[in-house]
Amino acid sequence: MKTNEGTLDRALRVVAGAALIAYAIISGSVWAYIGIVPLLTGIVGICPLYGILGISTCGKCSDGKSGSGCACEVKH
């Protein structure tokens, strides 16, 4: 799979995921460990749900650098 998350999207996911995990550790809330999902997708740069829905925030599709078609292979 190709990257389908932009820089800002990835940064927000990492921050939100880390905050949720920190909250889980501090409060003992098991549900807050859901922060692992945005943390990992932010680190890797691939969101499976974006792929299913055909969404991309990578910015490679609209900058004209990809030549023919989209560099992230998301169907638009």
Image: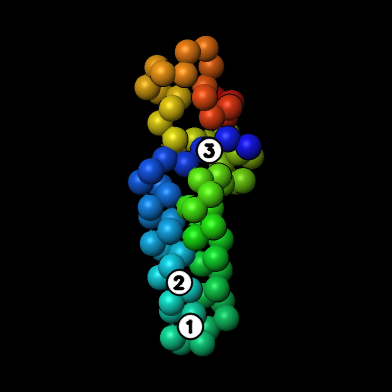
Which amino acid, by three-letter code, is at mark 1?
Ile
Residue at the disc numbered 2: 20
Sequence order check: which comes first, mark 2 or mark 3?
3
Residue 51 lies, with reference to residue 74, above or below; the image says below
Question: 10 Å neighbourhood of mark 3: few (<14), some, or many (≥20)?
Answer: some
The kind of secondary structure element at disc 1 is helix
| Quadrant housing the C terminus | top right
Which amino acid, by three-letter code, is at mark 3?
Thr
- In percent of width and height, residue 1 lies at 63, 37
| Residue 51 falls in image quadrant | top right
- In percent of width and height, residue 11 lies at 38, 52
Sequence order check: which comes first, mark 1 or mark 2?
2
Sequence order check: which comes first, mark 3 or mark 1?
3
Which amino acid, by three-letter code, is at mark 2?
Leu
Label 1 – label 2 distance at C-alpha? 9 Å
- In percent of width and height, residue 46 lies at 55, 44
Q: Residue at x 52, y 12 (%)?
A: 68
Front residue of 66/56: it is: 66
Residue 55 lies, with reference to residue 19, above or below; the image says above
Residue at the disc numbered 1: 25
The kind of secondary structure element at disc 2 is helix
| Residue 2 falls in image quadrant | top right
| Residue 37 falls in image quadrant | bottom right
Label 3 – label 1 distance at C-alpha? 30 Å
Residue at the disc numbered 3: 3
